[in-house]
Image (cartoon, grey):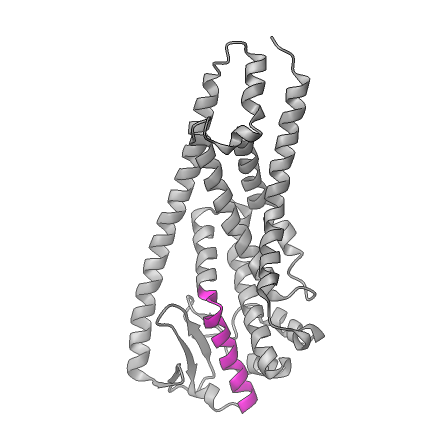
Amino acid sequence: MTVALGLLVATVVIGVAGPLYLRTAVTPSVRPGLALAGWVSSIALMVLVALVAAVVLLAPRAYVVDGLIGMSHSCVNVVRADGGAAWEHVARAAGAAAVFCALGWVAAVAGRLSWRRRRWRREHLALLRAVSRCERSVLWVDEDTPLAYSVGGRDGAVVATRGVARLGPRERDAILAHERAHMRGRHHLLVLLADVMAEALPFVPLCRRAPGAIRVLVELAADAAAARLHGPGSVRAGLLAVVGRGAPSTALAMSRDAVEVRLRWLGGERAAAGRPHSRAGYALAAALALAPALVSIGVVALGVLAYCLSVRPA
């Protein structure tokens, strides 16, 4: 049972302390894409660790990997000569049931939000395609106000107004590169993941704060991608040229989220010096997100071992 206890503790540590140590990654010295990978990896890892813990709790004792360091049951046998420990079976079942119920609720919320957004995307894009001009995967809307946003999904598109087309070529290209970076990075799915976790588990700090953090980070990541192609000055000018009002709330708009933070970031040297992210960098971010779980399991194992060494047979 030691592994199961360690996994449950790791779930709590990631869910409660995650925003504290992930906050240190949102700095100019860390690339936005890597900080974003850290947040997404932590959310996915919290769910995965909880699921594995539930499976370990329900698995037959002879089969489970917990037998390698499953000292908890041995301690019970030391304290109680009969080794019955009926409470252990109740605790295992209750713990597994709580985890599966929570994950089932997350799945239900994910299905509901995904269905709503798919329906909205289908209806919104059908309307836009009927009244706009499509050119190189961009839907140009006949509107003087400079506005640009992207709609994710398999049939998604970048939407821009005639006001954007009238901007200078540097600003226009930077704006379109920003929105295409959203599409290429599937940032809409990451925002949906954050919204699902926040609605399903609002009492978990990591889930509650994920939407705000991930919305900022996807914008910074798209800015960085556009800055690598057209320079931070062009992206900054494009950000100042467009407006955020009028874009749908479920879309990612060029000038709506964390504008002041993004302008400061684009004004620094980091944006100009940015380089494309490597797969190794994302793997490193995932590995760092895994560290709290491994530490938690190790601490629990050492605690159980210390207890086993301190008890005496009844």
Across and down, in percent, residue 196 comes to 43, 53
Residue 214 x %, y %: 53, 60
- Residue 293, image quadrant: top right
**What residue lies at 55% left-to-right and 15% top-to-bottom?**
77
Picture mark count? 0
Q: Give the percent coordinates (x, y) of residue 194.
A: 48, 56
In this rendering, would 32 be left or right of 176?
right
Q: Is residue 293 magenta?
A: no
**On screen, 78 above or below 180?**
above
Q: Tell me the residue at 36%/56% (across/down).
A: 113
In the depicted structure, whether residue 276 falls above or below residue 48: below
Q: Quadrant of the C terminus?
A: top right
Q: Residue at x 38, y 43 (%)?
A: 104
* Front residue of this view, candidates 305 and 260: 305
286 sits to left or right of 195? right
- Whether 87 is drawn above or below 301: the answer is above
- Judging depth in this view, the residue of 12 and 144 nearest the camera is 12
The quarter holding residue 121 reads bottom left
- Is residue 168 in sight in this rendering? no
Q: Is residue 184 visible?
A: yes
Instruction: Measuring from the top left, give residue 102's x and y in whole percent.
Output: 42, 41
Query: Which residue is at the front of the view, 28 or 124?
Result: 28
Q: On the picture, is 115 further left or further right than 285? A: left
Of helix, strand and loop, which mostly describes the magenta segment? helix
Start-end of magenta stretch:
169-188
